[in-house]
Image (cartoon, rainbow, N blue to C red):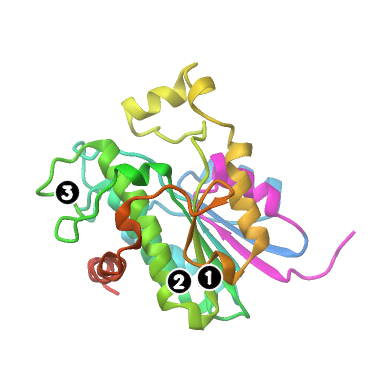
């Protein structure tokens, strides 16, 4: 039995169920200091007990929760080798705003992971190399980023468009990291895991319908299958060959919006996001 001290630190958000929980179980080991986060303390505890991970709860609909989470993680680790930004979902944009006043798909899907990753920059840059993986989606194709209306106050906020825009922002953020942090040894990739049949869509009646009924057999893949590309990238680590790459499952250079490579949007989204979270 391997009793050596952990030599790799992996942080997984959205790890209380679905592909995050599957990835946590697959990546756990005696040589891994595994940190998992999620919104449900009970679900997270079950994953922590199964993997030996350290668990921290946080609600990404609250930016103060994200700030507290970053402090907790930073106190617990010396460095981070892999950060899997997997927290998210799809939410009704017209039903409510977050406590911070943001459209929920924008905040939970992009702004909170942006804040967390930036706050964790010191431990990410502490080791020889680090990998940040942002869970995106093929839905980025229906997204449209407007830097002057990131919170959908002037545009009609259709749920699929808001969700797709958040997933497009994940790709833009990935390329922002690739551009800004490469000299720190930090590599970033985005990945579409596939249409996973888990608790995704639980906050939306229409999207969740396909995931909560027998339709899921025809529209979705299992969390085990969906987690495969995340696990593969995490095991690959800080490989410069994946820097700035969007994967459609295991395939690099997946189908993406024409906005996804726009340098003005990559820089503009970073600047506006930093302003909104006070960085």
- Among all residues in the image, which is located at the extreme bottom? 183
Could you tell me if residue 187 is visible in this image?
yes
Q: Which residues are magenta?
A: 1-29
The residue that label 2 is drawn on is: 178
Q: Secondary structure at mark 1?
A: strand
Question: In the visual, does 44 lie left or right of 180?
Answer: right
- Return the disc, 2 or 1, that comes first in the chain's sequence: 2
Q: CA distance from mark 3 to mark 2?
A: 27 Å
Task: Please state which of residues 219 and 74 is positioned toward the viewer in this rendering.
Answer: 219
Q: Height in image: 191 above or below 63? A: above
The residue that label 1 is drawn on is: 187
Residue that appears at 58% across and 71% down = 240
Residue that appears at 68% across and 59% down = 235
- Among all residues in the image, which is located at the extreme right? 1
- Return the disc, 3 or 2, that comes first in the chain's sequence: 3
Q: Secondary structure at mark 3?
A: loop
Tell me whether the residue at label 2 lies in contact with that at label 1, contact meaning CB atoms closer than 8 angstroms. yes
Membership of 20 in magenta stretch: yes
Q: Height in image: 94 above or below 146? A: above
């Amino acid at each position: 039995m391997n009793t050596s001290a952990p030599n790799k630190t992996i942080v997984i958000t959205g790890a209380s169920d679905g592909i995050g929980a599957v990835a946590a179980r697959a990546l756990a080991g005696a040589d891994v200091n595994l940190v998992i986060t999620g919104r449900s303390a009970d679900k997270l505890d079950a994953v922590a007990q199964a993997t030996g991970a350290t668990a921290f709860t946080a609600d990404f609909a609250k930016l103060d929760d994200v700030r507290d989470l970053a402090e907790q993680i930073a106190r617990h680790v010396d460095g981070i080798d892999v950060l899997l930004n997997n927290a998210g979902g799809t939410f009704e944009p017209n039903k409510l705003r977050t406590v911070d006043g943001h459209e929920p798909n924008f905040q939970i899907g992009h702004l909170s992971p942006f804040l967390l990753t930036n706050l964790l920059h010191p431990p990410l840059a502490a080791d020889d190399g680090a990998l940040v993986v942002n869970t995106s989606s093929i839905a980025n194709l229906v997204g449209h980023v407007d830097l002057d209306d990131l919170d959908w106050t002037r545009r009609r906020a259709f749920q699929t468009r808001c969700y797709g825009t958040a997933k497009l922002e994940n790709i833009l953020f990935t390329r922002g990291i690739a551009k800004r942090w490469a000299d720190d040894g930090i590599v970033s990739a985005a990945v579409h895991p596939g249409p996973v049949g888990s608790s995704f869509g639980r906050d939306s009646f229409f999207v969740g319908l396909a995931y909560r009924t027998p339709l899921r057999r025809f529209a979705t893949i299992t969390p085990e299958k969906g987690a495969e590309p995340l696990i593969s990238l995490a095991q690959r680590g800080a490989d410069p060959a994946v820097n700035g790459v969007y994967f459609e499952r295991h395939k690099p250079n997946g189908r993406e919006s024409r906005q996804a490579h726009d340098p003005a949007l990559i820089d503009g989204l970073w600047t506006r996001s930093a302003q909104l979270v006070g960085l």
